Every structure is written in structure tokens, then in C-alpha cells.
Amino acid sequence: MEKPTDTSKRKVSVLIPCYNEQESIPALHSRLQAVMDSMPRYEWEVISVNDGSSDGTLMMLKQLHARDKRWRYIDLSRNYGKETAMLAGMDLATGDCMIIMDGDLQHPPEEFPKMLSLWESGYDDVYGRRLHRGKEPWLRRKLSLLYYRLLQRTTRIPVLQNTGDFRLLDRICIDALTSMRETQRYTKGLYCQIGFRKHEFEFEQEDRSAGQSKWSMIKLLGLAMDGITSYTTAPLRISTAIGSLVSAIAFIYMAWVFIKAAIYGDPQAGFPSLMIVMLFLGGVQLLSLGILGEYVGRIFNETKDRPAYFIREVDGDRPQQNKYTKDK
Ligand code: UDP
Ligand code: MG
């Protein structure tokens, strides 16, 4: 099966994070293989990252590797989440460019020729925009749209809506992304952060070929929080603004209470107003503390300076501890 490697060919890496995708892998294999075989002018490498799956995903990836050495795999030591799995794949990719796609075939490999020709014409970051968001719970869709709008309002860097991780990245973008070693990653933000020449193409997102979406509402909320706290410090500023406004009002009220008491004496105990002010101020303070805490938590996590992931096995070999985890 293996073809002789031709050094004059440009190499394309295909990165596929896989978490419990055993039902999707056979279809993924046949469709991707067909696309790869239809473009022999490139040298191909598929890097599937097994993100701590508990089903037969790893076994199937090993079989693919045994049959065709172009199908490489990385076995992570546990489930780290898609963002980190992608980082691991980017660290190990050797291609001149890389195409990232989901393992559930929501990103059709048949789009590769279009993406590659855009890359050949000089774009560094060719990303897919979903024409339709596919089947999705109503609330989730609404929340997601609201979230993007909020994020865009608070930052100078453009936030791209309806673009997922289906994209082609030139080597220069991969190197830029892997140079950013934060462990609570929000890759969608990082793509925008790095800049470079971007080009959009539209694609029809298919429904999940098999299995279920691995994102629970809680996980999505966590990702949304990481997105905000890694993208923008606006919440801190907002809490400062609210804090100043509230203290200004409180100060005026204080002066008024003082003057009133000085002129007319203090005939009443004023318990309700006291409670209202206290509770309101307390609420605002707790909110600001919470926001502050989110950022301090991030600082705490990043200062531990731990490697983002550990690898159990790459293409059948056990890595020397951390050999594959890039130095900063
Ligand atoms: N994924 C992963 N680790 C996780 C969750 C998901 O590597 O902890 C992979 C998953 O196998 C798939 C991709 O990320 O290839 C997108 O996941 P999914 O289809 O569940 O998300 P959705 O399409 O609903 O956004
Ligand atoms: Mg999916």
C-alpha cells in the first residue's frame, strides 16, 4: 500500500481529534482515503488524536496505521478535550499545511481540493463557514449566537461566527498556534489572534454521521467562559465601571442621608433602605470578586506551567516522557 515518498511534493497533514468515534471511523476512512488518492500530487499524512476514548477508537486507529503508514495516530494519556487534542496534533504534524476536521464527518473531506487550491493561491488560513448549523437544540443555537455577539462587542479582534475548526492552516500558522502554550485553550480565538492571510469558503455541514455530540451544555459553558477570559479583559473593566457607578450613587446617597440627619435630626430607623443598599452593594461586590476570580484562576493555572497534555503512544511507539511536548 505504501507509496515511495517524493520529496518534491508538498505535504498535507490532516488532523482529526477523536473521542469515542468508533462508529464514524470506517466511513471517515473510506471517504478520506478516496480524497487523498484523488490528489496524488500531495504527500499525505493523517494524524488522528485519540483523546482518551473509552470505546474501540484507539484499536481502529491502530489497525488503520498498520495497513497504511500515512494514517498516524497519537494516543493521549486521558481525555483532555478537543482543544488540547488539536494542540497535540499540531505539535506533531510535519506537513507544509494542515487541514483540521472533525472525526464525525461533519466536515466533508470532499472540500479539500477547494481548500488546497486556495492555499496554493497564497492564503495561509482557509476556514469553512457553515451554511447551516445542522441539527441543534433551539436553546443551544440561540445561546451560541448571543455569545458570539457579546464576545465581538468586547474585543477589537474580529470574532468569526459560524466558523468551526474546519480549516486549512499553512505551516506558518501552525507554528504560530503551537507557540502559544496556554493550557485552557480557546482555539477559535487563537485563529483570529494570529492573523495572517485568511480566506473563507462555505460548506454544507452534515449531520453527525454516528454517535452523539460530545459537548454537554456544561462543557460548552466552560468553553464559553474560557473564550471570554482568554480573549478579553472587558469583564474586568465592566465590573470596574459598575463598581464606580454604584459607589458614586452610594456616595451621593450617603451625603444626602448625612445632611438630612444633620438638619432634621434622625426620627426614623430607616431599616429597609439600609438593607437595600447593603444587599445591593454586597451583590455588586461579590459579582466583581467572581469576575476577578475567573482571571486569577486562569493566572494560577497557567503559572503552574504544566505541559498541556501527555502522550501514551505515537504510531506504536511509547514517547520518552514529554519528548513530544514542545518546549516553550
Ligand atoms: N472531541 C475530542 N475530545 C472531546 C470532545 C470531542 O477530541 O473531549 C472531538 C470529537 O471526536 C469530534 C470533534 O472533537 O471529532 C467535535 O466533537 P463533536 O462532534 O462532539 O462536537 P460538535 O460537532 O457537536 O461541536
Ligand atoms: Mg460534531
Image (cartoon, helix red, strand yellow):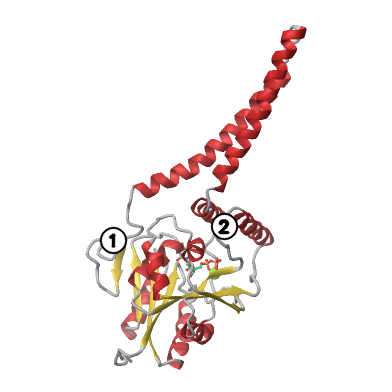
User: Quick one: label 2, few (<14), some, or many (20+) residues within 10 Å?
Assistant: few
Q: Amino acid at mark 1?
A: Asp
For mark 1, give the secondary structure: loop
Point out the quarter of the image occupied by ligand 2: bottom right
**Residue 43 image offset from top left, x and y in percent:** 37, 87
Image position of 93 (left or right of 110): left
Q: For residue 154, say whether it is visible.
A: yes
As drawn, the label of residue 223 is: none
Q: Measuring 51% from the left and 50% from the top, which residue is drawn there? A: 229
Q: Which quadrant would the N terminus be assigned to in this image?
A: bottom left
**Residue 220 image offset from top left, x and y in percent:** 55, 57
Q: Measuring 53% from the left and 39% from the top, which residue is drawn there? A: 290
For mark 2, give the secondary structure: loop
Image position of 169 (left or right of 140): left
As drawn, the label of residue 156 is: 2
**Residue 294 image offset from top left, x and y in percent:** 49, 44
Q: Which residue is label 1 attached to?
A: 327
**Residue 301 image offset from top left, x and y in percent:** 39, 47
Would you place residue 109 above or below residue 104 in this image?
Answer: below
Image position of 140 (left or right of 177): right
Q: For residue 266, say whether it is visible.
A: no
Q: Measuring 57% from the left and 62% from the top, which residue is drawn there? A: 158
Of residues 176 and 255, the one nearer the viewer is 255
Residues tagged 1 and 2 counted as in contact (Cβ below 8 A): no
Q: Which quadrant would the C terminus be assigned to in this image?
A: bottom left
Image position of 149 (left or right of 34): right
Answer with the quarter of the image where residue 279 lies: top right
Q: Amino acid at mark 2?
A: Arg
